Amino acid sequence: MTAITAQLSPQLSGVPETLLITLAARLVATRDNPDLGFVDPAAQAVGDALAFDPGRFAGDRASMRGSIVRSLWFDGVARQFVADCPQGLVVSIGSGLDTRANRIAPPPGITWVDLDFPEVIALREALVPSLPNVRHLAGDGTEVAAWVKQLDWEQGRPLLVLAEGVSMYLDPGRGEAWVRDLVDEARRRASPLTFALDLASPLMARHGRRNPSVGKTSASFSWGVRSPADLTRIAPGLALITAYDVAGRSGTMSYIISNLYRLITGRPVYSCALFTAAAP
Ligand SMILES: C[S@@+](CC[C@H](N)C(=O)[O-])C[C@H]1O[C@@H](n2cnc3c(N)ncnc32)[C@H](O)[C@@H]1O
C-alpha cells in the first residue's frame, strides 16, 4: 500500500466510497469493454498512484460497462458545451476521482470546477493530474447558494452542470430542492443553464443495495424518479432535451430488465438526461 493510500483511503466511506466503483470501471475498460473505445491514461495514473485493485468491483460486468457507457455520454455533453460556449463555466458535482477534464482538455476560456466532499477533494488534489483551467471545490453540491459564491460566474456566463452518479444517493426532498436551486441561480445571473445527470427509476432506487458493486460499499440509493421529464415539473423553466437509456446498453441482463421495465411502465429503468433552462 502506498503512503497516499494508507493516509487517505480509510476516510472513504458512505457515498464517497462509491467513487471507487467508477474508477474500477475506467481501469478495466480497455480490457473488458474494448468495443466502447474508452481510453483514459489519466485514470490509469490515478489507479497506479492509489495502488487500487479494481478486482473488488470488476466482476460486476453490468456496472463496469454501464459506468463507461454513461461516462462516454457525459463526455459528449461536455465536448458539445465547450465547443458551443468556449467562454463557459463547467461545474462537475460529485466528480469523485473522475478524469473527464483530462479527457476533454477544455480550451483556455473555459473554467472547469470539480466539486465534491472535502475528503474526496483531498484525494483529487493528491492524485488527479492538474490542468491550468481546472480547479477543485470542497463542499456539498446540493448547497447551491454556498458554492456559487465561490465561482467566477459573471452575469450571462453560460453554465454547464454535470452530476454523474450522484442523484440516486440524495434524499428525494434534497434532490428536488437542489434542481430548483440550480435553475433559480442561473435565472438570477441571467445565464443559460445546461444540466446533465443520470436518474434512477423508483424500482432501481429501492433495490440499490442489491447492485453487486454498491452492495460492497456502505452507500445505498434514496432518490428515484419515474421519468426524466418529472424534473421539468419539479423545476419549472427546465426543458428536457434528450434522455439516454444506459441500462439498455449495459450488457444482456440489463438490456432485458430495461426492456421489460419499459414494456410494463413505458419509462426507462435507468437513464442519463440532458436539460436546459434559457436565460430570462
Ligand atoms: C458514484 S461516485 C461518481 C464519481 C464520478 N462522478 C464518476 O463518475 O467517476 C459519486 C460521487 O458523488 C459524490 N457526491 C454525492 N453526493 C454529493 C454531494 N451532495 N455533494 C458533493 N458530492 C457528492 C460522492 O462523494 C462521490 O464522489
Image (cartoon, grey):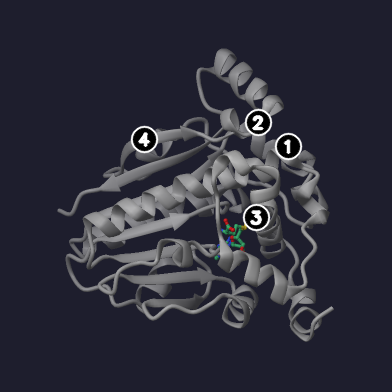
State the SS at label 2.
helix
In the rendered structure, which amino acid carries the disc numbered 3? Thr
State the SS at label 3.
helix
Spatial CA distance of label 1 from label 2 is 6 Å
Do residues under tags 1 and 2 come within 8 Å of each other at their CB atoms?
yes
- Residue in the picture at 62% in, 78% down: 127
From the image, tell me which residue sits under label 4.
242
From the image, tell me which residue sits under label 2.
203
Q: Nearer the viewer, residue 30 or 271?
A: 30
Return the disc, 2 or 3, that comes first in the chain's sequence: 3
State whether label 3 is within 8 Å of ligand 1: yes
From the image, tell me which residue sits under label 3.
22
Instruction: Give x and y (percent) for residue 59.
Output: 81, 44
Instruction: Give x and y (percent) for residue 258.
Output: 61, 24
CA neighbours of label 1 inside 10 A, class few (<14), some (14 to 19), many (20+): few
Which one is in front in this view, the residue at disc 4 or the one at disc 2? 4
